[in-house]
Image (cartoon, rainbow, N blue to C red):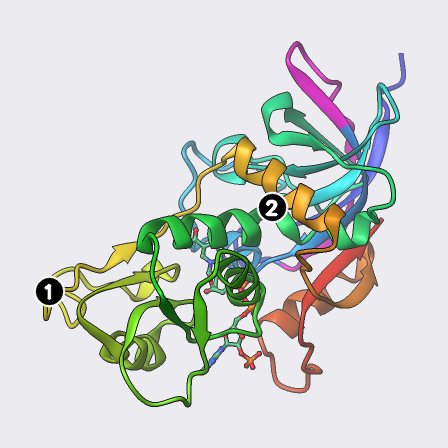
Amino acid sequence: MNEREMIAVGVETFGGPLRTLRLPVTAAGPGEVLVRVAAAAVNPADLGMVAGRYRWNDEVRFPLVPGYDVAGTDEATGQPVVAFTAHKSTQRGGYAEFVTLPADLVVPLPDGVAAVDAAPLPLAGMTALQALDAIDEVDTLLVNGPRGAVGSLIVQLATARGTTVVPADDPGPVDAAVDVVGGAVARAAFDRVRDHGRYATVVPEFWVPGGPFAADRGITPQVVSVRHDRNGLVELVEHLAAGTLTAKVGLVLPLTDAAQAHRIVGRSEGAPKVTGKIVLVP
Ligand SMILES: NC(=O)c1ccc[n+]([C@@H]2O[C@H](COP(=O)([O-])OP(=O)(O)OC[C@H]3O[C@@H](n4cnc5c(N)ncnc54)[C@H](OP(=O)(O)O)[C@@H]3O)[C@@H](O)[C@H]2O)c1
């Protein structure tokens, strides 16, 4: 029998160019869902994946198809869905016409929610929820990249919970800060937190154990490393469907233009600046 094939985009070696590939479609096994991808979001982590700066649970299998976030339909039932690919464990990427995932990662999408609007939600949204869990309930919060994907979702979710999100240029101490940028900007956010306040970063590569972010002034920094949380994803989808949460999309590109998406996200010389997520459409 002929194997079913699909178009995907991936690399054949770390650091290699992103290429359009013809790959077999993996049939859904027990407890899995075959998702026909309608939209795949591009995340900064995808650049680390293809460069080899990313830690998977198992040895990497090539070709490597990146991508954490997809929306589309369950091929077996026609149900619209949104899914987190949990690439760290599955190594199944969203930059493809189809992706086969454990059912736990796949959440139904209500009618009326466009795949392009839902695709940017899983990774950035679950990270935002987990960053808010890390700082717990506070009255005032600083987010140092409030227009980015994770940052803007933190701002919306925190505001909905009654927290006052303080603009970065507003002087004075805050109860908590969440860093979504890293580097010197992270330090500046940390310095704004009142004594015994809360601080969390989602940029762990800038974390230096025992360094400038060691417990200081009674503040113990929390490092958020996203983990799949089905209930959290369901909650995010409910907010999206109710119109109380938006993951801003800045650019929609054909899947085969994934390399251009990576140039934009990586801020390569000459690449246009895009505010909001880039979504790839097969
Ligand atoms: N820990 C985890 O599990 C986890 C999960 C998801 C994401 N992340 C990480 O979180 C970070 C944000 O991800 P994202 O998807 O939200 O990216 P994004 O949409 O590109 O947002 C990045 C934000 O950082 C701001 N920024 C960048 N450089 C800056 C600087 N020098 N000064 C001030 N602001 C600056 C950008 O502002 P402008 O656009 O205005 O420049 C933008 O608001 C990435 O490093 C990503 O790898 C970690």
Residue drawn at point x = 10 percent, y = 69 percent: 216
Q: Is residue 6 left or right of residue 203?
A: right
Give the residue at mark 2: 122
Tell me which corner region of the image, top left, top right, bottom left or bottom right, holds residue 25.
top right
Residue 64 sits inside the magenta stretch: no
Residue 67 appears anywhere in the view: no
Tell me which corner region of the image, top left, top right, bottom left or bottom right, holds residue 26.
top right
| Residue 260, above or below 11 | below
Give the residue at mark 1: 218
- Dot 2: what SS? helix
Which range is magenta? Answer: 17-34
> In the image, is the residue at mark 2 within 8 Å of ligand 1 by its beta carbon?
no
Residue drawn at point x = 67 percent, y = 70 percent: 276
Image mark count: 2
Tell me which corner region of the image, top left, top right, bottom left or bottom right, holds residue 192.
bottom left
Q: Is residue 112 left or right of residue 120?
A: right
Residue drawn at point x = 66 percent, y = 30 percent: 106
Residue 207 in the image, given as x and y percentages of width and height: 26, 63
